[in-house]
Amino acid sequence: MNVLLIILGLVLLVVGGEFLVRASVGLSFKLKLSKLVIGMTVVSFATSAPELLVSLQAALDGVSDIALGNVIGSNIANIGLVLGITAIISPLIIDREFYKLNWPMLMFMSFALYFFLSNDNVLSSVEGAILFIVLIGFLFLLIRDSRKKTKASIAEEVDESLAVVSNFKIGIWLIIGAAGLYYGSEWLVDGAKGFAKAVGISDYAISVTVIAIGTSVPELAASVIAALKKEKAISLGNLIGSNIFNIASVLGLTAMIKPIVVESSKILSTNIFWMICFAAILIPLVFFGKRFTIGRRKGLLLFIAYLIFIGLAFS
């Protein structure tokens, strides 16, 4: 039953997230927002909604380990699993601008999270607000520099057909999205807690592996399909942006509603360093070997490192 709840929860999160993104973009067009602003803010927040609902539900249920594990595991999976497998299928060309703002911001957010948690084993409401405010400033900088060619692709990813969607359809999408995210997060957290108890492992181990992989499945599927079609698989900048949003908006907003307490010793002794290392390794991967390219060997290295992380998570 617990496994069924986990599967149903993940399915509802994927469906709910997709409908929420569509509704949010359609509504943004109605409000006369530019494609660029929609792509960089609305879509980014909407695609973080599944992780946000899972972390918030977990925090409210008193299982902060799932709230933290969800984000830390998702950030590791985005680089080790999504980027690794995609690069194995089709080498990824890196834009020369990616390390000027996005990567430094990811490292800053990662170290800020570590500092806040290690200081008193709690991510407080004030600390959550600080992370979120920094995110708003980061988005302001991105939008200010949006006319540069490196940011043009973000606007191109917004589906223009959603500009002519009726208000009624947007309303239905919002209802479906909200219901999917609410029940999906509730079932996923309940199933994860029950499964962890049944097999005798920690909530954190389940969250940093099963839940994290589950919330990364949509990105992985889209990237693999694009790579197989020899299309541009993913933008490393967008992938890093997703990790920034996970820390600043998911944990930031969750902590503002209810402070997140560190319960598992593995969070600060091991796994947060895995998250930081997976982010840090991007720079040498980009500059060593074939410059500005993450090819099959580099992708395989990332994927093997991810498998090692998964193995250690259950040890």
Image (spheres, rainbow, N blue to C red):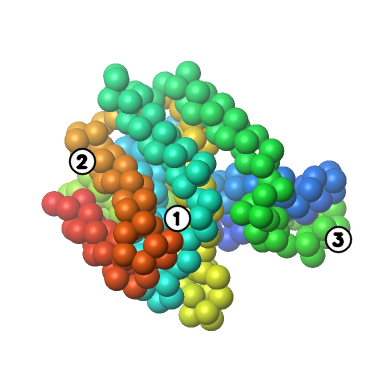
Name the residue at 60% across, 32% down. 136
| Circle 2 Cα neighbour tier, 10 Å, few/some/many (<14 / 14–19 / ≥20) | few
Q: Earlier in the sequence, mark 1 or mark 2?
A: 1
Left or right: 182 in relation to 36: left
Q: Distance between the residues labelled 3 and 2?
A: 49 Å
Amino acid type, callout 1: Thr
SS of the residue at dot 3?
helix
Report the number of discs: 3
Q: Can residue 87 be seen in this view?
A: yes
The image quadrant where one finds the N terminus is bottom left
Q: Which residue is drawn at 65% across and 34% down?
A: 140
Which residue bears the numbered disc 2?
270
Residue positioned 36% across, 51% down in the render: 283
Provide the residue designation for mark 1: 215
Crowding at mark 1 (Cα within 10 Å: few <14, some 14-19, many 20+): many
Residue furthest left as drawn: 315
Q: Quadrant of residue 180?
A: bottom right
Q: Pick whichever, 56 or 31, lies toward us.
A: 31
Residue 41 against residue 64 in the figure, above or below: below
Of callouts 1 and 3, the N-terminal one: 3
Q: How far apart are marks 1 and 3 (CA)?
A: 30 Å
Q: State if disc 2 and disc 1 touch (CB < 8 Å).
A: no
Q: Is residue 246 left or right of residue 159?
A: left
Of 312 and 230, nearer the camera is 230
| Residue on which the image places disc 3 | 164
- Give residue 6's quadrant in the image: bottom left
Residue 103: percent from the left, percent from the top? 45, 44
